[in-house]
């Protein structure tokens, strides 16, 4: 699904209701160019504005969200109640490429945005990071937003195929550096962290030793003396991808 699919669905609903785009946007209390901008630029709309439009048109917000992400299920025979939303904060950025010092922005610089609550992780603190670099651009282009939870809150180890935020401790400075990678767990229990990129500079994985069967934490709780030099900190559970130009 895509922004184009969402626009097509909105156009279908407006035609059925006999409404112009301008009138629909005015009734919803959003910019009169909201729909036009999606059509022209292909930009993913802000969820709060999309929710206002859905409510104004008396349409289930899940219908619109499904157009953007078909992982959100629809069942024509069963009404779907609107998804509950919460405020998630973009608290920093994560490098998809070279190791870069892991820094959290000052709290006054955190960027809030509404996002559907994922009931699988409703009891876990959730945060967002801006992706920088192109070692993961086949999945998360530069500028994308990834939503993540820490494995210490999940109380489990990473699993094969998951996208994770990996942390490395610099032995010289004792500072932490971070990068984004995909997990591969081999038969001997060792772990490879793979990029997903069309950049030939990013083709080799990072290799980690075997994981323990029980999650041991990651040293970020203050006891850095026992933390490994490289460890997997967070699981990526959602993403908002930036729009890329298509070669012609």
Image (spheres, grey):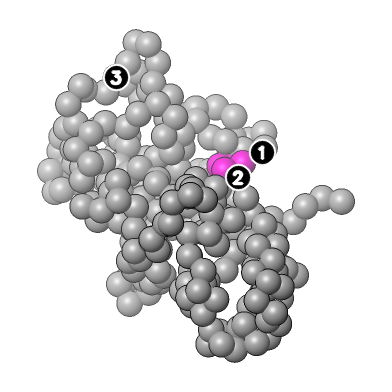
Does label 1 or label 2 sit earlier along the sequence?
2
Packing grade of label 3 (10 A; few <14, some 14-19, many >=20) is: few
Residue 99 screen position, x and y as percent = 45, 44
Residue 83 screen position, x and y as percent = 38, 61
Residue 111 in which image quadrant: bottom left
Dominant SS of magenta comes to loop
Q: Which disc is residue 137 wearing?
A: 2
Observer able to see residue 80: yes
- Secondary structure beneath dot 1 equals loop
Q: Do the residues labelled 1 and 2 touch (CB within 8 Å)?
A: yes
User: Which residue appears at 27% of the width and 23% of the height?
Assistant: 211
Residue interval drawn in magenta: 134-139
User: Which residue appears at 82% of the width and 50% of the height?
Assistant: 247
Observer able to see residue 99: no
- Secondary structure beneath dot 2 equals loop
Residue that extends furthest to the top in the rendered view of this protein: 188
Packing grade of label 1 (10 A; few <14, some 14-19, many >=20) is: some
User: Which residue appears at 53% of the width and 59% of the height?
Assistant: 63
Q: For this rendering, which residue is in front, 174 or 138?
A: 138
């Amino acid at each position: 699904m895509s922004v184009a699919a969402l626009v097509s669905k909105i156009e279908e609903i407006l035609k059925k209701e006999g409404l112009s785009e301008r009138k629909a946007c005015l009734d919803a209390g959003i910019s009169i160019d909201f729909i036009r901008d999606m059509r022209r630029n292909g930009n993913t709309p802000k969820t709060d504005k999309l929710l206002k439009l859905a409510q104004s048109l008396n349409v289930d917000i899940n219908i619109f969200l499904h157009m953007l992400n078909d992982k959100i299920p629809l069942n024509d025979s069963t009404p779907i109640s609107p998804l509950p939303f919460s405020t998630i904060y973009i608290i920093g950025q994560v490098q998809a490429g070279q190791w870069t010092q892991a820094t959290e922005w000052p709290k006054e610089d955190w960027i809030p945005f509404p996002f559907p609550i994922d009931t699988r992780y409703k009891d876990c603190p959730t945060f967002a990071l801006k992706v920088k670099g192109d070692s993961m651009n086949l999945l998360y282009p530069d500028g994308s937003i990834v939503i993540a939870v820490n494995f210490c809150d999940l109380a489990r180890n990473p699993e094969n195929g998951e996208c994770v935020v990996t942390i490395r401790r610099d032995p010289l400075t004792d500072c932490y550096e971070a990068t984004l990678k995909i997990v591969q767990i081999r038969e001997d229990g060792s772990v490879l962290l793979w990029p997903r990129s069309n950049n030939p500079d990013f083709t080799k994985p990072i290799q980690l030793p075997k994981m323990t069967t029980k999650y041991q934490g990651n040293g970020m709780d203050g006891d850095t003396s026992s933390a490994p030099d490289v460890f997997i900190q967070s699981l990526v559970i959602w993403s908002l991808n930036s729009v890329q130009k298509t070669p012609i």
